[in-house]
Image (spheres, rainbow, N blue to C red):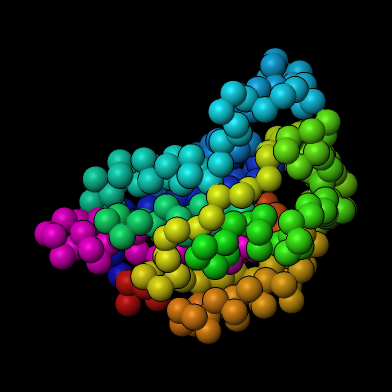
Amino acid sequence: MSSITDLAVIVCHGSWHTPAPYMPLVDALKAKGVEAYCPQLPTSDLTKLNVGDVNNPDLDREPPEGGYPGGEEEAEVITSLLRSVIGRGKKVLLLGHSAGGWVATEAARPELQAKSRKAQGQAGGVIGILHMGAFIIPVGESINSFVQARDGAVVAMPWMTFHKHGPAGLGTMVQTGEFLFHDLAPGEAEKWAATLAPSPILTSRLTNDGYAALPCAYLVLDGDRILPKVYQEAMVAAQSQKTGPFTIYHCPAGHSAHLSWTSGVVDTVLDFLKKIEG
């Protein structure tokens, strides 16, 4: 395995999230000597959603001119950071949580992968993707097309609600104490709920087959109430039939394992890095 100082982890956060709830995980990785990042992705960046005053956002306003940011813009945030990190020779593990699984897979472009860079005499690059309670979206599909009815009807899940413009506008998470943070103390759940943000639905289609090109792992969140365990396992099984097996891990946590099972997530990251690096 490479020296720990040669490795970095980039966390791709989920929809409706800001980086704030991932900072305990980022800090725990850094405490182990692993360089770690979790940049703000644009679909939940209030400054890009035309909500007016970001301290008192109006979620009923029209979409921004040109539309809401989408997956392409999210992937570009990660690829831009990747270019900077691997430009210093770092080997990078992408960690995608929830909708961040799509982002991580899309961002792991061939030219940024360690294998292709090595062939060109360059150091560093993406060495794998760890999906944590994440959507495993087939190439050619979007998160929205994958989870919604084939007739095009958009149905709000019980843990989210749309605002004035319905599916064409913004949605926010609801009942977060029951669905997202149920395995945290009430005070902690309230603290992290305050860091969430609105997001549009995600209609960008996956174009990069990171599953076939890179070692992939999946941390199944057995207590997840957003993406139930059986749903996570079914997504992995379906993709495995196309591109080969994932390394599978399990944990008892709910959807926010980065908060309720932080040290376990760190151990999972380190174990997968060890497997990749031999």
- Is the N terminus in the top left, top right, bottom left or bottom right quadrant? bottom left
In this picture, is 235 found above or below 27? below
Look at 12% across and 59% down and name the residue there. Answer: 121
In this picture, is 46 found above or below 7? above
- Which residue of the protein is positioned furthest toward the top in this rendering? 53
In this picture, is 64 found above or below 230? above
Would residue 203 be visible to someone looking at this image?
yes
Q: Is residue 134 left or right of residue 140?
A: right
- Which residue of the protein is positioned furthest toward the left in this rendering? 121
Look at 58% across and 66% down and name the residue there. Answer: 136
**Which residue is more in the foreground, 247 or 271?**
247
241 is within the stretch colored magenta: no
Would residue 29 be visible to someone looking at this image?
no
Q: Quadrant of residue 254?
A: bottom right
- Is the C terminus in the top left, top right, bottom left or bottom right quadrant? bottom left
Percent position (x, y) of residue 73? Answer: 48, 40
Look at 62% across and 25% down and name the residue there. Answer: 64
Look at 70% across and 15% down and name the residue there. Answer: 53
126 is within the stretch colored magenta: yes
Percent position (x, y) of residue 261? Answer: 66, 60
Q: Is residue 135 left or right of residue 57?
A: left
Q: Which residues are magenta?
A: 113-136
Q: Is residue 152 left or right of residue 209?
A: right
- Which residue of the protein is positioned furthest toward the front in this rendering? 151
Q: Quadrant of residue 109?
A: bottom left
